[in-house]
Structure formats: C-alpha cells, structure tokens
Image (cartoon, rainbow, N blue to C red):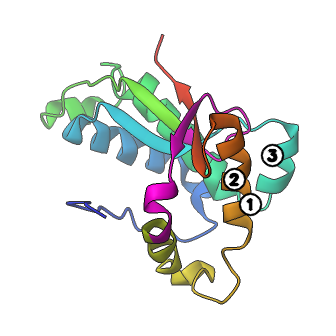
Amino acid sequence: MGVERVRFLRYDDSDLLFHQPRLRAELTALIRAERPRTIITHDPYPRQRLARCLRHLPDHTTLGLMTFQAAYLCGPGPLFYPEQLQAGLAPHRVEMLYLIMSDRPDLFIDVAPVWERRMAALRQHQSQGRDRPGAGRLLPRHRRRLGERAGCHLAEGFRRLAPT
C-alpha cells in the first residue's frame, strides 16, 4: 500500500472511550513528533442518521474526537502537555483533517482504479471478520452512491476540517 511505518498505540477494541485523556496525550505527542500536514480520522460529529449506525462503534467517534482535539487544540497549544515540550516535542499545527465515515463529505476521490487493491487490504483486517465471504457487500454499494455524487463509478468521501 506504500505505507512506510505503522505505529500501534495498543488499546483494546471497544475500549477507547475509557482512555480519552491518555489517548489524547499520546496522539498529541505523535503529532508533535511526526509533524503531519494532514490527518485522516473518523468524523467525531456524525449527524442523527449516521449517529444511529455508529452508536455500536464508539471507538470510531472517540478516536475522531481525540484526534481532533490533539490536532487543533493540544498539538499547537504550548500550554498542553508541558512535559512533551520539555522532552523536545515542539507545538505543531496540522493543516487539514480529512474525516471518514461522515454523512457530510465535501471531498470525493475516485477509487475505481485501486478498488481491488483496497478490498484486498480490507480483507486483511481479520479481527473484524472482514476476511469472511460476503463481508464486503455493503462497501461497494456505499462507494457507488458516493461516486454518483462525485461523477465517477466508485468514490471515497471525506469531510474536511481546517483549523481556524
């Protein structure tokens, strides 16, 4: 997929809600250390229709909210986590968050050219049952609906949040 490095924070599945302060601090440290221009994360503010679906997936909205706070409040703020500053992690402001699983996408990317590769990668997510036959039926249908909005066959949709 072209990823050069992956870092795992070692939280248990369905457990992020109970670790928000530590998670936000770790995300802030990562942002300050890696200094990314952009971050892709879950939409922390789903509207009612999507919120009903996501209520069974609290890790998604928790991760989105903690990433949002780390990127836009804590990461650039010199008053947050002074121990990180003392350790040499200087404040850093992310330029853009791209939010996935949003019901308000404002950026669409044509994914038809990489669809098979994307699905092969998704099937590797075995802990979530994605390797079972038929597990990926909903995804193409949703991507076709996004593609209709974007004027292509299959699309990913992102909601962009830029710091103010």
Of tags 2 and 3, which is closer to the observer?
2
Q: Amino acid at mark 3?
A: Leu
Question: Are the two marked residues, 2 and 1, in contact with CB atoms closer than 8 angstroms?
Answer: yes
Q: Position of residue 149 (x, y in %)?
A: 70, 36
Q: Amino acid at mark 2?
A: Arg
Quarter assignment of residue 43: top right
Q: Is residue 11 visible?
A: no
Per the rendered image, the range of residues in magenta is: 99-116
The residue to which callout 3 is attached is 50
The residue to which callout 2 is attached is 144
Alpha carbons under labels 2 and 3: distance apart: 18 Å
Q: Residues within 10 Å of mark 2 (few under 14, many from 20)?
A: some
- Between 118 and 19, the one nearer to me in the picture: 118
Q: Amino acid at mark 1?
A: Arg
Q: Residue at x 78, y 62 (%)?
A: 56
Q: Position of residue 42 (x, y in %)?
A: 58, 46
**Is 59 part of what is drawn in magenta?**
no
Apparent side of residue 148 relative to residue 90 in the rendered image (left or right): right
Q: Residue at x 61, y 64 (%)?
A: 15
Q: Residue at x 27, y 29 (%)?
A: 82
Q: Earlier in the sequence, mark 3 or mark 1?
A: 3
The residue to which callout 1 is attached is 141
